[in-house]
Amino acid sequence: MSRLVLDRRATGVLSWQKVRRVIAKRFDSRPSHASFLAQRRFASLNGLRCLAILEVIWHHASGRRLDPSGRGGVDLWFAISGFLITTLLVREFSKTGKIGVLRFYARRTLRIFPLYFAALGGYVALVLLTKRGTPEGTAFMPHLPAFATYTSNWFVPLGDGQSTIFYFAWSLATQEQFYLLWPLALLACVTVTGRAAVAIPARARP
Protein backbone atom coordinates (compact mmCIF):
# COMPACT_ATOMS: atom_id res chain seq x y z
CA MET A 1 0.00 0.00 0.00
CA SER A 2 2.74 2.42 1.01
CA ARG A 3 4.62 1.54 -2.17
CA LEU A 4 1.56 2.42 -4.24
CA VAL A 5 1.27 5.77 -2.46
CA LEU A 6 4.95 6.47 -3.11
CA ASP A 7 4.53 5.59 -6.80
CA ARG A 8 1.59 7.98 -7.09
CA ARG A 9 3.54 10.72 -5.37
CA ALA A 10 6.51 10.14 -7.63
CA THR A 11 4.26 10.26 -10.67
CA GLY A 12 2.72 13.50 -9.40
CA VAL A 13 6.17 15.05 -8.83
CA LEU A 14 7.33 14.03 -12.30
CA SER A 15 4.16 15.43 -13.88
CA TRP A 16 4.56 18.73 -12.04
CA GLN A 17 8.21 18.94 -13.02
CA LYS A 18 7.24 18.35 -16.63
CA VAL A 19 4.64 21.12 -16.45
CA ARG A 20 7.22 23.46 -14.95
CA ARG A 21 9.69 22.66 -17.73
CA VAL A 22 7.06 23.34 -20.39
CA ILE A 23 6.13 26.66 -18.78
CA ALA A 24 9.77 27.68 -18.39
CA LYS A 25 10.48 26.77 -22.02
CA ARG A 26 7.49 28.79 -23.12
CA PHE A 27 8.66 31.88 -21.29
CA ASP A 28 12.25 31.45 -22.43
CA SER A 29 11.07 31.35 -26.04
CA ARG A 30 9.49 34.80 -25.82
CA PRO A 31 10.98 37.38 -28.20
CA SER A 32 13.90 39.33 -26.81
CA HIS A 33 13.89 43.10 -26.64
CA ALA A 34 16.37 43.17 -29.52
CA SER A 35 14.03 41.15 -31.74
CA PHE A 36 11.16 43.44 -30.74
CA LEU A 37 13.18 46.48 -31.83
CA ALA A 38 14.00 44.77 -35.12
CA GLN A 39 10.39 43.80 -35.84
CA ARG A 40 8.93 46.07 -38.51
CA ARG A 41 5.40 44.63 -38.68
CA PHE A 42 3.02 43.32 -36.04
CA ALA A 43 1.06 40.70 -37.95
CA SER A 44 -1.11 39.91 -34.92
CA LEU A 45 -2.62 43.39 -35.12
CA ASN A 46 -4.24 42.57 -38.46
CA GLY A 47 -6.92 40.56 -36.66
CA LEU A 48 -7.71 43.49 -34.38
CA ARG A 49 -7.88 45.81 -37.37
CA CYS A 50 -10.33 43.41 -39.00
CA LEU A 51 -12.53 43.41 -35.89
CA ALA A 52 -12.48 47.22 -35.78
CA ILE A 53 -13.50 47.48 -39.45
CA LEU A 54 -16.24 44.87 -39.10
CA GLU A 55 -17.70 46.70 -36.08
CA VAL A 56 -17.85 49.97 -38.02
CA ILE A 57 -19.45 48.26 -41.03
CA TRP A 58 -21.99 46.53 -38.78
CA HIS A 59 -22.85 49.78 -37.01
CA HIS A 60 -23.50 51.70 -40.24
CA ALA A 61 -25.15 48.87 -42.15
CA SER A 62 -27.50 47.64 -39.45
CA GLY A 63 -27.97 50.75 -37.33
CA ARG A 64 -27.35 48.63 -34.23
CA ARG A 65 -24.65 49.12 -31.63
CA LEU A 66 -22.36 46.41 -30.37
CA ASP A 67 -21.31 48.67 -27.50
CA PRO A 68 -23.10 51.50 -25.65
CA SER A 69 -21.10 54.28 -27.32
CA GLY A 70 -21.43 52.92 -30.85
CA ARG A 71 -17.78 53.75 -31.47
CA GLY A 72 -16.09 50.55 -30.31
CA GLY A 73 -14.49 49.84 -33.67
CA VAL A 74 -13.15 53.38 -34.01
CA ASP A 75 -11.84 53.35 -30.44
CA LEU A 76 -10.05 50.05 -31.11
CA TRP A 77 -8.53 51.52 -34.27
CA PHE A 78 -7.35 54.56 -32.29
CA ALA A 79 -5.75 52.28 -29.68
CA ILE A 80 -3.89 50.33 -32.36
CA SER A 81 -2.72 53.54 -34.00
CA GLY A 82 -1.57 54.92 -30.66
CA PHE A 83 0.39 51.75 -29.92
CA LEU A 84 2.13 51.78 -33.31
CA ILE A 85 2.99 55.47 -33.25
CA THR A 86 4.27 55.30 -29.68
CA THR A 87 6.35 52.22 -30.51
CA LEU A 88 7.82 54.01 -33.52
CA LEU A 89 8.79 57.07 -31.48
CA VAL A 90 10.13 55.09 -28.51
CA ARG A 91 12.25 52.94 -30.81
CA GLU A 92 13.72 56.05 -32.40
CA PHE A 93 14.55 57.48 -28.99
CA SER A 94 16.05 54.17 -27.82
CA LYS A 95 18.37 54.05 -30.83
CA THR A 96 19.29 57.72 -31.30
CA GLY A 97 18.55 59.41 -27.98
CA LYS A 98 16.18 61.86 -29.68
CA ILE A 99 12.81 62.10 -31.43
CA GLY A 100 12.77 63.70 -34.87
CA VAL A 101 9.43 65.49 -34.58
CA LEU A 102 9.71 67.37 -37.88
CA ARG A 103 10.71 64.21 -39.72
CA PHE A 104 7.75 62.42 -38.15
CA TYR A 105 5.40 65.19 -39.30
CA ALA A 106 6.83 64.99 -42.83
CA ARG A 107 6.26 61.23 -43.00
CA ARG A 108 2.67 61.51 -41.75
CA THR A 109 1.97 64.36 -44.19
CA LEU A 110 3.26 62.46 -47.22
CA ARG A 111 1.39 59.33 -46.15
CA ILE A 112 -2.03 60.86 -45.43
CA PHE A 113 -2.47 64.29 -47.04
CA PRO A 114 -2.39 63.38 -50.76
CA LEU A 115 -5.13 60.75 -50.57
CA TYR A 116 -7.20 62.75 -48.06
CA PHE A 117 -7.26 65.94 -50.11
CA ALA A 118 -7.85 63.99 -53.32
CA ALA A 119 -10.92 62.44 -51.66
CA LEU A 120 -12.06 65.83 -50.37
CA GLY A 121 -11.67 67.34 -53.83
CA GLY A 122 -13.72 64.49 -55.27
CA TYR A 123 -16.48 65.16 -52.75
CA VAL A 124 -16.49 68.87 -53.65
CA ALA A 125 -16.94 67.99 -57.33
CA LEU A 126 -19.72 65.50 -56.57
CA VAL A 127 -21.55 67.95 -54.34
CA LEU A 128 -21.42 70.64 -57.03
CA LEU A 129 -22.68 68.19 -59.63
CA THR A 130 -25.34 66.29 -57.68
CA LYS A 131 -26.19 68.15 -54.46
CA ARG A 132 -26.22 71.80 -55.46
CA GLY A 133 -29.22 73.55 -53.95
CA THR A 134 -30.04 70.73 -51.54
CA PRO A 135 -29.83 71.21 -47.75
CA GLU A 136 -26.90 68.79 -47.57
CA GLY A 137 -25.03 70.49 -50.41
CA THR A 138 -25.68 73.95 -49.01
CA ALA A 139 -24.34 72.91 -45.60
CA PHE A 140 -21.27 71.19 -47.06
CA MET A 141 -19.49 74.26 -48.45
CA PRO A 142 -19.30 76.21 -45.15
CA HIS A 143 -17.78 73.10 -43.57
CA LEU A 144 -14.91 72.95 -46.07
CA PRO A 145 -12.46 74.96 -43.91
CA ALA A 146 -12.97 72.51 -41.04
CA PHE A 147 -12.53 69.53 -43.35
CA ALA A 148 -9.42 71.05 -44.90
CA THR A 149 -7.79 71.79 -41.52
CA TYR A 150 -8.66 68.49 -39.79
CA THR A 151 -10.91 70.23 -37.26
CA SER A 152 -14.27 68.84 -38.33
CA ASN A 153 -14.58 66.98 -35.03
CA TRP A 154 -14.77 70.40 -33.36
CA PHE A 155 -16.71 72.54 -35.80
CA VAL A 156 -19.01 70.30 -37.87
CA PRO A 157 -22.21 69.47 -35.94
CA LEU A 158 -24.08 66.21 -36.21
CA GLY A 159 -27.47 65.10 -35.01
CA ASP A 160 -29.59 67.91 -36.40
CA GLY A 161 -31.78 65.47 -38.30
CA GLN A 162 -30.02 65.62 -41.66
CA SER A 163 -27.03 63.81 -43.10
CA THR A 164 -23.70 65.63 -43.11
CA ILE A 165 -21.59 65.04 -46.19
CA PHE A 166 -18.00 63.97 -45.43
CA TYR A 167 -18.69 63.90 -41.71
CA PHE A 168 -16.76 60.62 -41.36
CA ALA A 169 -13.66 62.82 -41.54
CA TRP A 170 -14.08 63.47 -37.80
CA SER A 171 -12.11 60.28 -37.07
CA LEU A 172 -9.30 61.35 -39.40
CA ALA A 173 -9.30 64.78 -37.76
CA THR A 174 -8.99 63.19 -34.33
CA GLN A 175 -6.14 60.99 -35.53
CA GLU A 176 -4.29 63.92 -37.11
CA GLN A 177 -4.56 65.92 -33.90
CA PHE A 178 -3.06 62.95 -32.06
CA TYR A 179 -0.20 62.85 -34.58
CA LEU A 180 0.36 66.56 -34.04
CA LEU A 181 0.36 66.61 -30.24
CA TRP A 182 1.57 63.20 -29.07
CA PRO A 183 5.18 63.41 -30.39
CA LEU A 184 5.59 66.76 -28.63
CA ALA A 185 4.12 65.37 -25.39
CA LEU A 186 6.33 62.27 -25.56
CA LEU A 187 9.40 64.39 -26.32
CA ALA A 188 8.65 66.58 -23.31
CA CYS A 189 8.22 63.47 -21.18
CA VAL A 190 11.54 61.91 -22.12
CA THR A 191 13.30 65.24 -21.83
CA VAL A 192 12.11 65.69 -18.26
CA THR A 193 12.43 62.12 -17.04
CA GLY A 194 15.48 61.02 -19.02
CA ARG A 195 16.25 58.05 -21.19
CA ALA A 196 15.56 55.46 -18.48
CA ALA A 197 11.88 56.42 -18.36
CA VAL A 198 11.29 55.25 -21.93
CA ALA A 199 14.10 53.06 -23.21
CA ILE A 200 13.89 49.47 -21.98
CA PRO A 201 17.30 47.97 -21.08
CA ALA A 202 18.61 45.66 -23.76
CA ARG A 203 18.49 42.64 -21.44
CA ALA A 204 14.98 43.26 -20.16
CA ARG A 205 12.11 41.05 -21.19
CA PRO A 206 9.06 42.69 -22.85
Image (cartoon, rainbow, N blue to C red):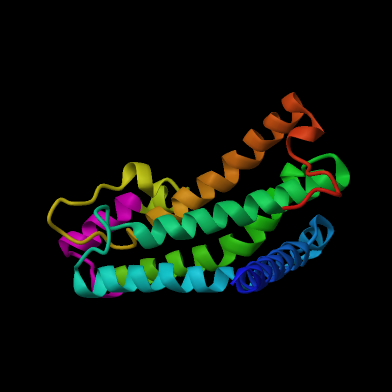
Q: Residue at x 84, y 58 (%)?
A: 34
| Among the 4 quarters of the image, the one containing residue 75 | bottom left
> Is residue 123 or residue 77 the one in the foreground?
77
Residue 172 rendering spot, x and y as whole percentages:
46, 56
Work out which quarter of the rendered image holds the N terminus and state it.
bottom right
57 lies left or right of 45: left
Residue 132 rendering spot, x and y as whole percentages:
23, 67
Q: Residue at x 54, y 45 (%)?
A: 178
Q: Residue at x 72, y 43 (%)?
A: 101
Magenta stretch: includes residue 113 = no
Q: Residue at x 30, y 68 (%)?
A: 127
| The residue stretch that appears in magenta | 128-143
> Is residue 142 or residue 36 the one in the foreground?
36
145 lies left or right of 201: left
Outermost residue, top side: 192
Decide: is 23 above or below 177: below
Residue 29 rendering spot, x and y as whole percentages:
77, 67
Outermost residue, front side: 1
